[in-house]
Amino acid sequence: MPACLPAYPARFFSHDLAVVRFISGEVLVLKDGEVVEQADAATILERPQQDYTKRLLGAIPRGYQAQAA
């Protein structure tokens, strides 16, 4: 987790997966209010396991370049 972020737990809800990598340590992917995948941000974004997560990641605009935080 980046050093500039608070060390206490917080919830951040976003549809912008490009931002999630930079502010989240752990990610839960929800579909219809149910958790479909849970892992650290790098795992979710680089090696998603669920088809729904893969489709969400496929929706990120192609101009975005993922970089390690």
Image (cartoon, rainbow, N blue to C red):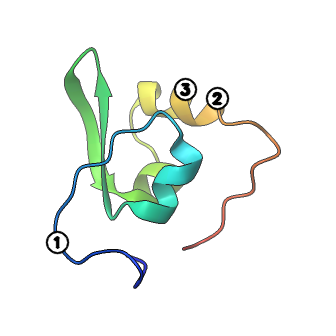
Residue 67 lies in quadrant: bottom right
Seen at 53% across and 55% down, the residue is 46
Q: From the viewer's perspective, tell me whether residue 15 is left or right of residue 60.
A: left
Query: Where the C terminus falls, by quadrant?
Result: bottom right
Q: Which badge, 1 or 2, is on the more N-terminal residue? A: 1
Residue 31 to residue 19: above or below: above
Question: Which dot, 1 or 2, sits closer to the camera?
Answer: 1
- Circle number at residue 55: 3
Which amino acid type corresponds to the residue marked 1 in the rendered image?
A: Tyr
Q: In this view, does 64 lie above or below 23?
A: above
Task: Report how far apart the C-alphas of labels 3 and 2 lie in the structure.
Answer: 6 Å
Q: Quadrant of residue 28?
A: top left
**Residue 5 appears anywhere in the view:** yes
Label 1 Cα neighbours within 10 Å, binned few <14 / some 14-19 / many ≥20: few
User: What amino acid is at disc 3?
Assistant: Arg
Q: Are marks 3 and 2 in contact (CB under 8 Å)?
A: yes
Quarter placement of the N terminus: bottom left
| Residue bearing the label numbered 1 | 8
Q: Mark 2 = which residue? A: 59
Which of the pair 29/51 is nearer the observer?
29
Q: Which residue is drawn at 79% across and 40% down?
A: 62
Residue 20: percent from the left, percent from the top?
47, 52
Left or right side of 9 for 44: right
